[in-house]
Amino acid sequence: MRHYDYIFAGGGLAAMMVLLEMHHRGLTPGKQILVIDPDPRDSNDRTWCFWDRPGGKFDSIAFRQWDSAFFIDNRQKLKMDLAPYRYKMVRGQDFFTYARQVLFGTYDVINESVTAWEDTGSGARITAGGKTFTCRRLFNSIFSEKSVTESPQHYLRQHFIGWKVRTANAVFDPGTPTFMDFSVAQKGNTRFMYVLPFAPNEALVEYTLFSKDLLEDSEYETAIAAYLEELGDGNFEIVEKERGSIPMTVHPFHKDNSGHVTFIGSAGGWTKPSTGYTFASTVKRASKLVSIMAKDGDPGKMVPNPRFTFYDALLIDVLYHENFKGSSIFSALFADGKPAPIFKFLDEETTIAEEIMILAKCPKRTFIGALWRYLTS
């Protein structure tokens, strides 16, 4: 039974972010580290997008960056200037290749599924591929849907299927992604199209919902095909496909931590609950976690900001009880075509005064109802 200093159950975005932070802060030399993940992470099956200022730490691997974006609903098509931010796209394959290059020789890898783990009181024990390993600390990024479905907190998903397509005609504006297009039929949900253009005839087009229940694959794909035809080109080639289902909940994941097991990534509540955005949130939380480790603190004691958890809880409550109102909420937030304050708010960097101004844009009766349910639940 081999012993390690650190074991990562799951080798996805969160694990690599934590390892990169540990490496940059000089915390990996002399440490025995193991990553256990059945996925070799060698295909481009996922995409992360995030807003960030120019000169960010992952600009070197950003596949695209944009200075403006469209927001569309049934009333208008806004072209929004994102300054001082840019909207950036990182492909999964590029990120994992970069991480492996930077971390070369830093950790061992086992491409197996984790079948059991436990906090032993003096460390952690984990089993994978019929073998058992021990460690001082286990970082667990294996998401358990059971834990959130049994939670008293509302649980939604940001779920989507995306096609990278090549069209016969020039139908995309390569300089401007479509952040949200709510002009598609809502069907009682919060549904929108999301378009990342790479060339006039090439883009990633995703049909996305914020809702409780997943759809049949055919419903996502039929919607994408209809959208492309509406843009003016039903003649297209599908180059790649991706799918996702991202948890949206304010479940207190940090309470699942124990003395020697720390949950990270979506399993640790690192996804922004109200939007499903993951990359930038993971960058911040990985940095905070490793800062605690550098001071010999307990990374399991890291907790989310309660003020922003409250805001997230209100939006999730609205979407849970009145899912059809998502379009009107986001339309109200972006109505002035100035997204920078919203981005700052979602990054949890605003002051209370700035937050009051943003919340004042939201449909008041809707959120008063959510506040009442929050206070009386």
Image (cartoon, helix red, strand yellow):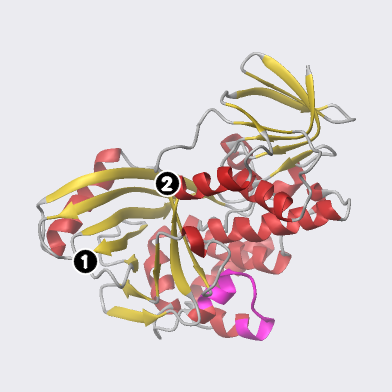
Disc 1 packing (10 Å; few <14; some 14–19; many ≥20): many
Picture quadrant of residue 218: top left
Visible residue check, residue 303: no
In the rendered view of the protein, which quadrant contains the C terminus?
bottom right
Q: CA distance from mark 1 to mark 2?
A: 21 Å
Disc 2 packing (10 Å; few <14; some 14–19; many ≥20): some
Q: Which residues are magenta?
A: 342-354
- Is 68 placed above or below 326 here? below
Q: Residue at x 62, y 84 (%)?
A: 354
Q: Residue 43 at what x, y percent from top left?
A: 41, 38
Q: Residue at x 11, y 63 (%)?
A: 232
The magenta stretch spans residue 346: yes
Picture quadrant of residue 114: top right
Please state the total of marks drawn on the protein image: 2
* Earlier-in-chain disc, 1 versus 2: 2
Mark 2: secondary structure: loop
The residue that label 1 is drawn on is: 172
Drawn side of residue 320 relative to residue 8, left or right: left
- Is 317 placed above or below 11 here? below
The magenta stretch spans residue 157: no
Q: Residue 160 at what x, y percent from top left?
A: 37, 49
Q: Amino acid at mark 2?
A: Arg
Q: Amino acid at mark 1?
A: Phe
In the rendered view of the protein, which quadrant contains the N terminus?
top right
Which label belongs to residue 46?
2
Which label belongs to residue 289?
none
